[in-house]
Amino acid sequence: MDPIQIVQLELADLEVLQQLSRQTFTETFAIHNSEEDMHNYLTNNLSLDTLTNELSNPNSKFYFAIEGDKKIGYLKLNLGEAQSDVKDPNSLEIERIYVLNTYFGKKVGQVLYQKALAMAKELKLKYIWLGVWEKNERALQFYKKNGFIEFDQHIFKLGNDEQTDLLMRLFI
């Protein structure tokens, strides 16, 4: 395996981001959700318009994980008002870490997480936080292994289904 490179996205990467976002989200959640709810989420939340708005927000940062010339995962970070819940100027939200299933177990998520941690330390923030679906055991295990602790919950709407996300944070 080639070393994993982390590269910040630009608007020119929009279509690749959309394809990777849809593929990784489907691989992660399709087995647990209805086809209709998945379709609604992919159509509305991962549309080119939505992703353009997110990429254009100066308080949101996207990064690809690249092996060789293949994009194998991505990271979305939010600062300040771009954060989905907490909106604390002393925090960084990891909104998304997604990796292609064929790269599970190869430390890609850990490399993306390390990028988030390095950014939070560089900005001298107090903590990193995130929301993770209560039924996503793999992700919960990953974040707990990295020292995150649950501090609250919120509802995440996937299509018509209201799901519970556990809010977790790590003080740095």
Image (cartoon, helix red, strand yellow):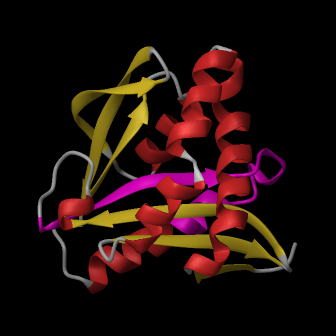
Image quadrant in which you'd find residue 72: bottom right
Say whether residue 99 is magenta: yes
Outermost bottom residue: 122
**Which residue shows up at 71% across the image and 55% down it?**
20
Say whether residue 106 is magenta: yes
The image position of residue 9, as x and y in percent, is 57, 78
Image quadrant in which you'd find residue 151: top left
Measured along the vertical axis of the image, is residue 40 above or below residue 89?
above
Q: Can residue 65 be seen from the camera position used here?
A: yes
Measured along the vertical axis of the image, is residue 109 above or below residue 104?
below
Q: On the picture, is 12 further left or further right than 94?
A: right
- Range of residues picked out in magenta: 89-112
Work out whether residue 152 or residue 159 is closer to the camera in this orientation and state it. Answer: 159
Image quadrant in which you'd find residue 123: bottom left
The image position of residue 126, as x and y in percent, is 16, 67
**Which residue shows up at 18% across the image and 62% down it?**
81
Outermost front residue: 49
Q: Can residue 9 be seen from the camera position used here?
A: no
The image position of residue 122, as x and y in percent, is 29, 85
Dividing the image into 4 quarters, which one contains the C terminus?
bottom left
Q: On the picture, is 154 further left or further right than 105?
A: left
**Which residue shows up at 48% across the image and 54% down it?**
50
The image position of residue 142, as x and y in percent, is 52, 45
Q: On the picture, is 165 further left or further right than 8?
A: left
Q: Give the number of callouts.
A: 0
